[in-house]
Amino acid sequence: MNKILFSAISKKFVMALAGLFLLLFLPVHLGINLMLLKDDPEPFNNAAHFMATFHLVKAVEILLLLTILVHVVYGIILQVQNWFLRPVRYAVRNKSETSAFSRFMIWTGGAVLIFLVIHFFNFYFMKLGLVDGDPENFYSIAYQLFSIPGYVILYWVCFILLGFHLYHSLQSAFQTLGLANDFWTPVIKGISLIYAVAVPLGFAIIPLFIWLLK
């Protein structure tokens, strides 16, 4: 039992560190994406070109992909372990046992993962030459995608789910790292709420603006 518990705690610790690294990347990605709101495509295309060609960025990109892989794999393993450790479904669930955010983390995370795969096909795989398209003009590609109502709706749904995922995952990560006490818990909860609203909303505004006003 101690061995299983230690293994689970170790995975949670690694998963927390991976998640926090990913959370540092999102505002950077958002800052670049906000350039799509400019009428001039050059700033966004130049930023995309820099991100695709600068060697240090490419090294960070590899680390980022490995981090996503670790976060996803460990998340699935921990959830499966949790299901096997508590196989019996009680007729009356104790709501204080876990929050709705915690119970649905695997599903919100799965929805975000599906969106990431779609996003990779539309942009990252194009940059690698695995799918057709012009990697030097991601501005036009983004505008083409955001002119499709179904894609915009999918984008919005995924970022709403990402917000729920971020809200719980930030708190869970800091709790795993030991910052859970009377002082830090409300502070982290407030920061988590601001981050979980501001970052997904920033991403979601971009396709809506392009779809309705461009």
Image (spheres, rainbow, N blue to C red):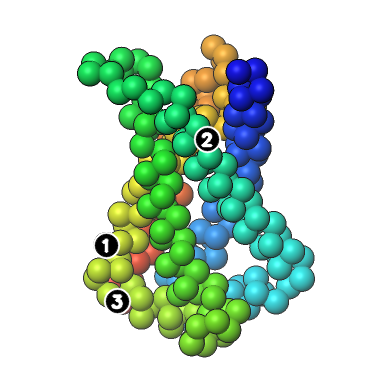
Q: Is residue 208 above or below residue 132?
A: above
User: Seen in the image, is 68 located left or right of residue 119?
Assistant: right
Where does the image place residue 21, in percent across and percent down from the top left?
63, 46
The secondary element bearing badge 3 is classed as: loop
Lower sequence index among marks 1 and 3: 3
Which-is-in-front pick, marks 1 and 3? Answer: 1
Where does the image place residue 56, in percent across and percent down from the top left?
76, 65
The secondary element bearing badge 2 is classed as: helix
User: Label 3: which residue?
Assistant: 147
Say which amino acid is labelled 1. Answer: Ile
Say which amino acid is labelled 3. Answer: Ser
Image quadrant holding the C terminus, namely: bottom left
Which-is-in-front pick, marks 2 and 3? Answer: 2
User: Label 1: which residue?
Assistant: 153
Name the residue located 41 percent from the left edge and 60 percent from the top edge.
115
Q: Is residue 170 above or below residue 198?
A: above
Determine the residue located farthest toward the top in the rendered image: 182
Circles 2 and 3, Cβ within 8 Å, touching? The answer is: no
User: Label 2: which residue?
Assistant: 78
